[in-house]
Amino acid sequence: MTLAEQLQAYRQGFREKVAENIQDTMGAATAALKESGILDGVASEGQQPPDFELPNAQGQPVRLSEKLKAGPVVVTFYRGQWCPYCNLELKALQNALPEFEKRGAQLIAVSPQTPDNSLSTTEKNELTFEVLSDVGNQVAQQYGLVFTLPEELRPIYASFGIDVPAHNGDDTFELPIPATYVIGKDGAIALAVADADYTQRAEPEAIIAALDKLSN
Protein backbone atom coordinates (compact mmCIF):
# COMPACT_ATOMS: atom_id res chain seq x y z
CA MET A 1 0.00 0.00 0.00
CA THR A 2 1.13 3.53 -0.70
CA LEU A 3 1.27 5.97 2.19
CA ALA A 4 -1.79 7.74 0.76
CA GLU A 5 -3.71 4.44 0.81
CA GLN A 6 -2.67 3.76 4.41
CA LEU A 7 -3.77 7.24 5.48
CA GLN A 8 -7.09 6.84 3.69
CA ALA A 9 -7.70 3.46 5.38
CA TYR A 10 -7.04 5.00 8.79
CA ARG A 11 -9.35 7.96 8.00
CA GLN A 12 -12.11 5.54 7.04
CA GLY A 13 -11.73 3.58 10.26
CA PHE A 14 -11.77 6.81 12.26
CA ARG A 15 -15.03 7.91 10.62
CA GLU A 16 -16.65 4.59 11.51
CA LYS A 17 -15.69 4.88 15.20
CA VAL A 18 -16.09 8.58 16.04
CA ALA A 19 -19.34 10.49 16.52
CA GLU A 20 -20.42 12.63 13.59
CA ASN A 21 -20.56 15.87 15.61
CA ILE A 22 -16.93 15.40 16.65
CA GLN A 23 -15.93 14.73 13.05
CA ASP A 24 -17.77 17.89 12.00
CA THR A 25 -15.93 20.00 14.61
CA MET A 26 -12.57 18.59 13.56
CA GLY A 27 -13.35 19.06 9.87
CA ALA A 28 -14.40 22.65 10.42
CA ALA A 29 -11.15 23.39 12.27
CA THR A 30 -9.11 21.97 9.38
CA ALA A 31 -11.10 24.01 6.86
CA ALA A 32 -10.57 27.18 8.93
CA LEU A 33 -6.82 26.53 9.08
CA LYS A 34 -6.71 26.11 5.30
CA GLU A 35 -8.61 29.37 4.87
CA SER A 36 -6.32 31.22 7.30
CA GLY A 37 -3.67 31.62 4.63
CA ILE A 38 -1.01 29.77 6.63
CA LEU A 39 0.27 28.08 3.48
CA ASP A 40 1.10 31.46 1.96
CA GLY A 41 3.91 31.90 4.47
CA VAL A 42 5.56 28.47 4.51
CA ALA A 43 9.04 27.83 3.16
CA SER A 44 8.73 26.89 -0.50
CA GLU A 45 10.65 25.47 -3.44
CA GLY A 46 13.63 27.49 -4.57
CA GLN A 47 14.10 29.20 -1.22
CA GLN A 48 17.10 28.80 1.07
CA PRO A 49 15.47 27.61 4.31
CA PRO A 50 16.80 28.66 7.71
CA ASP A 51 19.64 26.60 9.13
CA PHE A 52 18.93 25.04 12.51
CA GLU A 53 20.46 22.99 15.30
CA LEU A 54 18.23 20.79 17.47
CA PRO A 55 18.78 17.90 19.90
CA ASN A 56 18.11 14.37 18.70
CA ALA A 57 16.38 11.66 20.72
CA GLN A 58 19.61 11.07 22.66
CA GLY A 59 20.05 14.78 23.39
CA GLN A 60 22.92 15.24 20.92
CA PRO A 61 22.87 18.40 18.74
CA VAL A 62 22.20 17.99 15.02
CA ARG A 63 22.77 20.89 12.59
CA LEU A 64 21.16 20.97 9.17
CA SER A 65 24.09 22.73 7.47
CA GLU A 66 26.47 20.03 8.71
CA LYS A 67 24.26 17.31 7.28
CA LEU A 68 24.08 19.13 3.93
CA LYS A 69 27.86 18.93 3.56
CA ALA A 70 27.41 15.21 2.87
CA GLY A 71 24.52 15.54 0.41
CA PRO A 72 20.79 16.28 0.22
CA VAL A 73 18.65 16.21 3.35
CA VAL A 74 14.98 15.30 3.65
CA VAL A 75 13.40 17.22 6.53
CA THR A 76 9.90 16.32 7.68
CA PHE A 77 7.92 18.20 10.32
CA TYR A 78 5.33 16.12 12.21
CA ARG A 79 3.00 16.82 15.13
CA GLY A 80 3.98 14.14 17.65
CA GLN A 81 3.94 10.48 18.57
CA TRP A 82 0.30 10.83 19.67
CA CYS A 83 -0.74 11.46 16.05
CA PRO A 84 -1.55 8.21 14.19
CA TYR A 85 -1.11 9.88 10.79
CA CYS A 86 2.38 10.98 11.84
CA ASN A 87 3.28 7.44 12.87
CA LEU A 88 2.11 6.06 9.53
CA GLU A 89 4.23 8.68 7.78
CA LEU A 90 7.33 7.99 9.89
CA LYS A 91 7.07 4.25 9.26
CA ALA A 92 6.67 4.84 5.51
CA LEU A 93 9.74 7.10 5.54
CA GLN A 94 11.69 4.46 7.45
CA ASN A 95 10.75 1.90 4.80
CA ALA A 96 11.91 4.30 2.07
CA LEU A 97 15.13 5.23 3.87
CA PRO A 98 17.32 2.79 1.90
CA GLU A 99 16.17 4.47 -1.34
CA PHE A 100 16.97 7.92 0.11
CA GLU A 101 20.40 6.74 1.22
CA LYS A 102 21.05 5.14 -2.18
CA ARG A 103 20.72 8.67 -3.57
CA GLY A 104 23.10 10.10 -0.99
CA ALA A 105 20.39 11.69 1.13
CA GLN A 106 19.85 11.78 4.88
CA LEU A 107 16.50 12.01 6.67
CA ILE A 108 15.57 14.21 9.63
CA ALA A 109 12.19 14.31 11.40
CA VAL A 110 11.28 17.31 13.56
CA SER A 111 8.47 17.74 16.09
CA PRO A 112 7.78 20.02 19.07
CA GLN A 113 7.94 17.06 21.45
CA THR A 114 10.41 16.94 24.31
CA PRO A 115 13.53 14.78 23.74
CA ASP A 116 12.06 12.02 25.94
CA ASN A 117 8.99 11.84 23.74
CA SER A 118 11.15 11.92 20.61
CA LEU A 119 13.00 8.92 22.02
CA SER A 120 9.67 7.15 22.55
CA THR A 121 8.74 7.90 18.94
CA THR A 122 12.04 6.47 17.74
CA GLU A 123 11.68 3.30 19.77
CA LYS A 124 7.98 2.74 19.06
CA ASN A 125 8.41 3.06 15.31
CA GLU A 126 11.90 1.47 15.17
CA LEU A 127 13.32 4.50 13.41
CA THR A 128 16.98 4.62 12.38
CA PHE A 129 17.07 8.24 11.21
CA GLU A 130 17.45 11.42 13.26
CA VAL A 131 14.35 12.44 15.24
CA LEU A 132 14.81 15.98 16.54
CA SER A 133 13.08 17.92 19.30
CA ASP A 134 11.96 21.46 18.42
CA VAL A 135 10.60 22.47 21.83
CA GLY A 136 8.69 25.73 21.51
CA ASN A 137 8.38 25.24 17.73
CA GLN A 138 11.18 27.74 17.15
CA VAL A 139 12.40 26.08 13.95
CA ALA A 140 8.91 25.26 12.68
CA GLN A 141 8.06 28.92 13.23
CA GLN A 142 10.95 29.97 10.96
CA TYR A 143 9.56 27.65 8.28
CA GLY A 144 6.11 29.27 8.62
CA LEU A 145 4.40 26.10 9.81
CA VAL A 146 3.09 26.91 13.30
CA PHE A 147 -0.53 27.33 14.37
CA THR A 148 -2.37 27.12 17.69
CA LEU A 149 -4.75 24.21 18.24
CA PRO A 150 -8.24 25.78 18.47
CA GLU A 151 -10.02 25.82 21.83
CA GLU A 152 -12.86 23.67 20.51
CA LEU A 153 -10.48 20.83 19.62
CA ARG A 154 -8.73 20.65 23.00
CA PRO A 155 -11.45 18.74 24.89
CA ILE A 156 -11.84 16.43 21.89
CA TYR A 157 -8.13 15.66 21.89
CA ALA A 158 -8.28 15.15 25.67
CA SER A 159 -11.14 12.66 25.18
CA PHE A 160 -8.83 10.72 22.84
CA GLY A 161 -6.20 10.65 25.60
CA ILE A 162 -4.00 13.22 23.85
CA ASP A 163 -2.26 15.73 26.14
CA VAL A 164 -0.47 18.10 23.76
CA PRO A 165 1.14 20.28 26.48
CA ALA A 166 2.55 17.22 28.23
CA HIS A 167 4.13 15.99 25.00
CA ASN A 168 5.53 19.41 24.12
CA GLY A 169 6.61 20.50 27.58
CA ASP A 170 4.73 23.82 27.42
CA ASP A 171 1.16 25.11 27.58
CA THR A 172 0.90 26.88 24.24
CA PHE A 173 -0.99 24.21 22.25
CA GLU A 174 1.17 25.20 19.27
CA LEU A 175 1.76 22.61 16.56
CA PRO A 176 3.35 22.55 13.10
CA ILE A 177 1.29 21.73 10.06
CA PRO A 178 2.83 18.60 8.51
CA ALA A 179 5.49 19.48 5.94
CA THR A 180 8.28 17.70 4.10
CA TYR A 181 11.23 19.34 2.38
CA VAL A 182 13.92 17.96 0.11
CA ILE A 183 16.90 20.28 0.50
CA GLY A 184 19.76 20.05 -1.98
CA LYS A 185 23.42 20.16 -1.04
CA ASP A 186 23.40 23.80 -2.19
CA GLY A 187 20.92 24.56 0.58
CA ALA A 188 17.97 25.27 -1.71
CA ILE A 189 14.58 23.58 -1.35
CA ALA A 190 14.00 21.20 -4.25
CA LEU A 191 10.64 19.88 -3.04
CA ALA A 192 8.20 21.39 -0.54
CA VAL A 193 5.02 19.60 0.51
CA ALA A 194 2.97 21.27 3.26
CA ASP A 195 -0.73 20.78 3.98
CA ALA A 196 -3.08 22.34 6.51
CA ASP A 197 -4.90 18.98 6.50
CA TYR A 198 -2.90 16.83 8.93
CA THR A 199 -4.25 13.64 7.33
CA GLN A 200 -2.31 14.39 4.12
CA ARG A 201 1.43 13.70 3.84
CA ALA A 202 4.20 13.69 1.24
CA GLU A 203 4.45 10.40 -0.61
CA PRO A 204 7.89 8.74 -0.34
CA GLU A 205 7.86 8.21 -4.11
CA ALA A 206 7.62 11.99 -4.62
CA ILE A 207 10.62 12.47 -2.34
CA ILE A 208 12.61 9.87 -4.28
CA ALA A 209 11.68 11.58 -7.57
CA ALA A 210 12.92 14.92 -6.22
CA LEU A 211 16.19 13.32 -5.12
CA ASP A 212 16.61 11.79 -8.56
CA LYS A 213 16.23 15.23 -10.15
CA LEU A 214 18.97 16.58 -7.89
CA SER A 215 21.35 13.89 -9.06
CA ASN A 216 20.67 14.46 -12.78
Image (tube, rainbow, N blue to C red):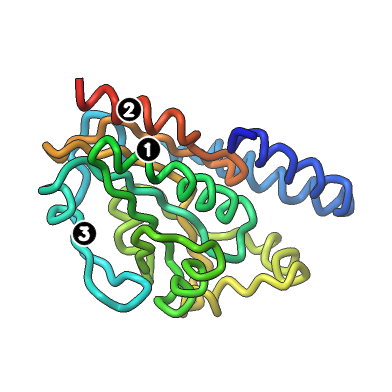
The kind of residue on which mark 3 rests is Phe
The residue sitting at 26% across, 30% down in the picture is: 190
Viewed as shown, does residue 26 lie left or right of 67? Answer: right
Quadrant holding the N terminus: top right
In the depicted structure, whether residue 204 falls above or below residue 210: below
Q: Secondary structure at mark 3?
A: loop
Please give the label number shown on residue 99: 1
Q: Is residue 53 left or right of residue 196?
A: left
**Which corner quadrant holds the C terminus?**
top left
Badge 2 or badge 3: first in the primary sequence: 3
Of residue 113 and residue 203, the one placed in the foreground of this image is 203
In percent of width and height, residue 113 lies at: 45, 70
Q: Is residue 5 above or below residue 54?
A: above
Which is nearer the N-term, disc 2 or disc 1? 1
Which residue has dot 2 on it? 210
Going by the numbered disc 1, the residue's amino acid type is: Glu
> Which mark is in front, 3 or 1?
1
Front: mark 2 or 3: 2
159 with respect to 76 (left or right): right
